[in-house]
């Protein structure tokens, strides 16, 4: 998905066909109902998770679902209506790693505009060191810094968050780290030719 | 809106009726199509703006639209697909106050879960001190701290952001401030009776 919209054919209010055009007084194309006139705005979604620490180790999950099946992620997922950002981080950690956490502070905000997402990661403490394996995970594990599987990271935002967290832990102080991730370059079919 | 969903009657993919139920393997009710099975997830939206400073003064706009017509806000609005959080803050400031800004850092994150929103405010510098009045504003103005119209604030998140910003400016250092805003208590018809 690199377009402005998720495709839409019918009005969710009255069921008649929609058309895509810039509404009067607006600046961007929107899906609008050809019958009842309802404008269907589409906006970015938030994906929220945490780095849960226990005795210096970091809780990770290996994905049992696509995309990135089999790769290592941090507990994270789409924020739901009627919850706060910190509640979303705690809920996702419970769902994916069966782990209760005490959420501390937001330390990473990652824009992924071409897929209409904003990712956020909180620092957190794993309560009692207890965790399990949620239905969307193949396994969960506590990793020392030295044993983190950097080659098997599910998402670039997860790598960014881990690097920011490790760097801040070294400094003894957590700040807010932000980055904008562009689309991934296409995988070359042959190795690139050296320049110059 | 204090429910979990924005009401939906028809599938935006195939136009058939939707029903509201917890899908298999899920934990929350979702609208799903009774014919094609498409699940229509609903998620919170981001409202993003900035405090644009010029010679110690703060750029504000008086709203020309509902809700809160006639009250003072900060330039802010719904984040769009295909943009970053900082780009959203700059775009909204251009739309509402015809002002070019240099966005600096995120300093306020405000959860408003009962209306399915997360508000974010950035620090920013008003370029050249130039601004105007966008179509959604009645007027724009630069305010000294002492002249801020606290009694005419459009939104609680705007008051929170202004207080956090002013407090940090006094300290000479901007941090990240977060708050969760509950629903507003209903306006009493008669003044509350003193207790005790």
Image (cartoon, coloured by chain):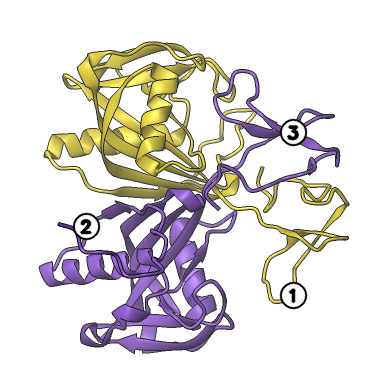
Chain colours: A purple, B yellow
The front one of B191 and A143 is A143
- Return the residue nearer the eye: B67 or B18: B18
- How far across and how far down the image is residue B125, in percent? 23, 27
The answer for how far apart the CA atoms under marks 2 and 1 are is 40 Å
Q: Which residue is mark 1?
A: B24
Task: Identify the mark nearer the N-term, 3 or 2.
Answer: 3
Percent x, y for residue B47? 47, 39
The image quadrant that residue A13 belongs to is top right
Badge 2 local density, few (<14 within 10 Å), some, or many (20+)? Answer: some
Residue at the image point whose x is 41% and y is 36% from the top: B88
| Chain letter for mark 2 | A
Q: Is residue B12 left or right of residue A3?
A: right
Q: Secondary structure at mark 3?
A: strand
Image quarter of the C terminus of chain A:
bottom left
The label number, if any, that marks residue A19 in the structure image: 3
Q: In the image, what residue occupies the spot 47% across and 31% down?
A: B155
Name the chain under label 3.
A
- Front disc: 3 or 2: 3
Disc 1 secondary structure class: loop
Is A172 on the left or on the right of B195, as rendered?
left
Q: Residues within 10 Å of mark 3 (few under 14, many from 20)?
A: some
Q: Chain of mark 1?
A: B
């Amino acid at each position: 998905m690199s377009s402005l919209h998720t495709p839409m054919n019918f009005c969710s209010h009255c069921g008649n066909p929609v058309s895509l055009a810039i509404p009067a007084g607006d600046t961007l194309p929107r899906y609008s109902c050809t019958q009842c006139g309802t404008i269907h705005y589409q906006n970015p979604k938030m994906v929220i998770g945490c780095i849960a620490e226990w005795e210096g180790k970091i809780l990770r999950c290996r994905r049992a679902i696509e995309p990135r099946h089999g790769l290592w992620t941090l507990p994270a997922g789409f924020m739901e209506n009627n919850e706060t950002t910190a509640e979303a981080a705690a809920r996702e950690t419970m769902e994916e790693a069966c782990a209760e956490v005490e959420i501390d502070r937001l330390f990473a905000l990652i824009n992924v505009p071409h897929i209409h997402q904003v990712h956020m990661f909180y620092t957190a403490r794993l309560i009692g060191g207890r965790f399990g394996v949620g239905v969307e995970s193949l396994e969960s594990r506590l990793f020392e810094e030295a044993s983190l599987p950097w080659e098997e990271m599910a998402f670039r935002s997860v790598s960014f968050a881990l690097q920011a967290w490790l760097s801040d832990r070294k400094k003894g102080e957590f700040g807010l780290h932000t980055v904008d991730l562009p689309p991934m370059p296409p995988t070359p079919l042959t190795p690139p030719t050296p320049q110059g």
